[in-house]
Amino acid sequence: MCRYGINTYKPHYACFECRKTFKRRLLKDIDRDSIEFEKQSYKCPECGGITANMGFDFESPKKPNTKAWNHMESLYETGITFHSCGCTGPGYIPRDKNKLIEFLNEKKVIYVENLRFWTTRLEPKNESEKSKDWDKNSHFLFSLPREFTTGTKKKRYTDLKKAVEYWTERINEIDSRIIKITNKIRHS
């Protein structure tokens, strides 16, 4: 059974300044009819700074381990957290800054492949072309958010300009994350 539904399974919030974690009650624990999670930020009870939602599966390092805490902060700043329902865990978590850069570069390669696909894409014109296109390119078609696609399965249309903009933004985000982590490595 998925631990998500158990009331004792709470999200972990981390204060990187104090190097402490806190569990927070969910709105549905207070109001059983509510299925909406609170989206507001939460302050650290010790220093008053904003805490980071690290997810259900976050295990904090020991307080004196500043290197591990700095790495957790780097993970958070690059969008890597420990969110899952607890059944399968959060997935791959890079164990140090070099592995994090390697992981981000691997993601960037995938993003660049997607950008190349959408910048050179010609929409299929007939059913035969659509079928071949679907068989050959489904991984690219599925990796784009649904809101960029309109129409029915038979008459699907993708906004190529939005697709190119989407992947360009993803690449720029990855580049800025890599630069930020590289600068942290240089200054540590």
Image (cartoon, helix red, strand yellow):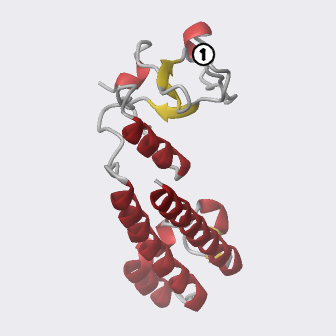
Using the rendered view, name the quadrant where residue 162 is placed: bottom right
Please tell me whether residue 159 is drawn above or below residue 48 in the rendered image.
Answer: below
At 39% from the left and 32% from the top, the residue drawn is 58
Q: Is residue 125 visible?
A: no
> The N terminus appears in which quarter of the rendering?
top left
Q: Position of residue 132 (x, y in %)?
A: 41, 86
Residue position marked by numbered label 1 in the rendering: 46
At 56% from the left and 33% from the top, the residue drawn is 52
Q: Nearer the viewer, residue 175 or 70?
A: 70
Please tell me whether residue 110 is drawn above or below residue 34 in the rendered image.
Answer: below
Q: Is residue 34 left or right of residue 11?
A: right
Q: Is residue 118 visible?
A: yes
Q: Position of residue 23 (x, y in %)?
A: 49, 18
Q: Position of residue 26 (x, y in %)?
A: 56, 17
Q: Amino acid at mark 1?
A: Glu
Q: Is residue 40 left or right of residue 140?
A: right
Using the rendered view, name the quadrant where residue 57 is placed: top left
